[in-house]
Amino acid sequence: MSTVIPASRPRSGAGSAIAAIFAVSAAATLFLIWLIYIHPPSAAGPRYAFLPAMNAVFNGLAATALMIGYALIRAHRIRAHRAAMITAFVFSTLFLIGYIAHHALHGDIRYPLDAAYRSVYLPLLASHIVLAIVALPMVLVTFFFSLSGRIPQHRKIARFTFPIWLYVSVTGVIAYVMLRLARA
């Protein structure tokens, strides 16, 4: 005879897993700050000039998968929702890998001082960066709750994770387009 543990009851290890997620998220954030603001770029040249566009595509694909996943969960198509959300996670991960590569090779690209829409771009970028930092642990915790069968906790945090993750993905594309147009 086996005992069934209710889904809403915390299971052992959840606290340490969430603490590990926050530690990894903090380490990733500190690494990116170091990479962007302290580490000198390797000046790889135009060979890797495609990285920002590729990253924008990954962000756009992540946003698309997120919206599809949202529509699927509203239709109670759980398996398809899970596949869409894993797809969004993969695209966001590929974005992050490309973002790290771009900044390691080329450094930070600044919006021109005299370009139009700078007063729109900078607040957009600031909100994008702050919410990206917030989104990382939220996405990981949301996935942890889902994959470990803690569906009530998953639902509670997903209500906040989804719009933040979607905003970060969409504003990543907008920031790329604005920077590209300003530097053209």
Image (tube, rainbow, N blue to C red):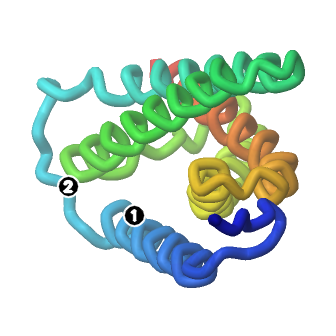
Q: What separation in Å lies between label 1 and label 2 (alpha carbons)?
A: 13 Å
Image-based side of 105 in relation to 119, left or right:
left
* Rendered position, 26 above or below 158: below
Label 2 is placed on what type of residue? Answer: Pro
From this viewpoint, is residue 115 visible? Answer: no
In the picture, the disc for residue 41 is 2
Front one among 175 and 134 = 134
Residue annotated with mark 1: 32
Q: Earlier in the sequence, mark 1 or mark 2?
A: 1
At 69% from the left edge and 68% from the top edge, which residue is drawn?
3
Residue 170: % across, % down: 68, 29
Image-based side of 10 in relation to 25, left or right:
right
Front one among 110 and 86 = 86
* Rendered position, 20 above or below 84: below
In the picture, the disc for residue 92 is none
Label 1 is placed on what type of residue? Answer: Leu
Residue 77: % across, % down: 76, 19
Asked which quadrant contains residue 16, the reply is: bottom right
At 40% from the left edge and 44% from the top edge, which residue is drawn?
96
